Amino acid sequence: MTTIVADTMTVFARELRPVLRNPFSVIFTMVQPLFFLALFAPLLPGDSSLQWFVPGIVVMSCLFGTSMTGSNLLYEMQTGAHERMLVSPLRRPALIIGRALKEIVPMLAQTVLLVLVTMPFGFTPNVPGAAIGLVIMAIFCVGLGALSYTLALVSKDQEWMFWGVQQTLLFPLLLLAGMMLPIDNGPQWLQTMARFNPLTYVVEAERLLFNGTIASGTVLAGLVAAVAVAVVGLFVGTRAMRRA
């Protein structure tokens, strides 16, 4: 008799296998964040610009990579692989939870690579803070991955809808989180919109954690925002998978 945990681990292992076979796919999703790092970091004032910019780029890399993972499910639906999973003994919630948990692995690999690339240029992460930051990022990745898979289920047979929604939401979320440029001195309406963006709290928490500030209300707000995204993502994803 299978359990939800065993089914989830089965799906997790199945989803992780292509990543392990082709690790360059993880590196490829980092190309765009690295371009932003190279082009925007020199524009920021001060000698500590990397300490401010790199944590934001870490979150950006997670956002780019995880938000498009639903395209893998779209491909499986087009080839019939997803239908074969649906008629298997695996429980349907495990099909979304296992996929979402897999997003933690590429996020960890990308973060380590980004930190290693930027350290020779002066970036010095606080190790305990960075470790806690990775936990928050992992929770956020699970929620974001579940939302991406949910969008794929809703966009079944309409691939253009998946990419249209993903691209429409991606850059406003990115810019309103203040990843590339600070918005503290921006107009009030911009700062108000940023307060409604959960990504804002995650980015602010990562900046403090990577620079060594752990006990902070900002860090707690980032954790709450990440948990909220995970709960919402897994809830709507599980409902969508049950109806698939």
Image: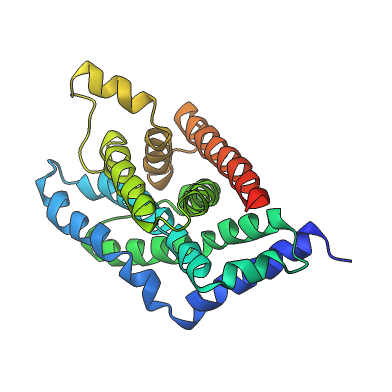
In the rendered image, residue 76, in percent from the top left (x then y), is placed at 52, 69
Q: Point out the residue furthest to the right here.
A: 1
Of residues 27 and 87, the one drawn nearer to the viewer in this rendering: 87
In the rendered image, residue 187, in percent from the top left (x then y), is placed at 18, 19
In the rendered image, residue 179, in percent from the top left (x then y), is placed at 28, 42
Of residues 193 and 75, the one drawn nearer to the viewer in this rendering: 75
- Answer above or below: position of 19 versus 106: below
Say whether residue 11 is left or right of residue 33: right
What scheme was used to colour the molecule?
rainbow
Name the quadrant containing residue 33. Answer: bottom left
Q: Quadrant of the N terminus?
A: bottom right
In this view of the protein, can residue 55 be seen by the observer? no
In this view of the protein, can residue 44 be seen by the observer? yes
Name the quadrant containing residue 107. Answer: bottom left
Identify the residue shown where x is 59% and y is 47%: 237
Identify the residue shown where x is 18% and y is 24%: 186
Say whether residue 10 is left or right of residue 64: right
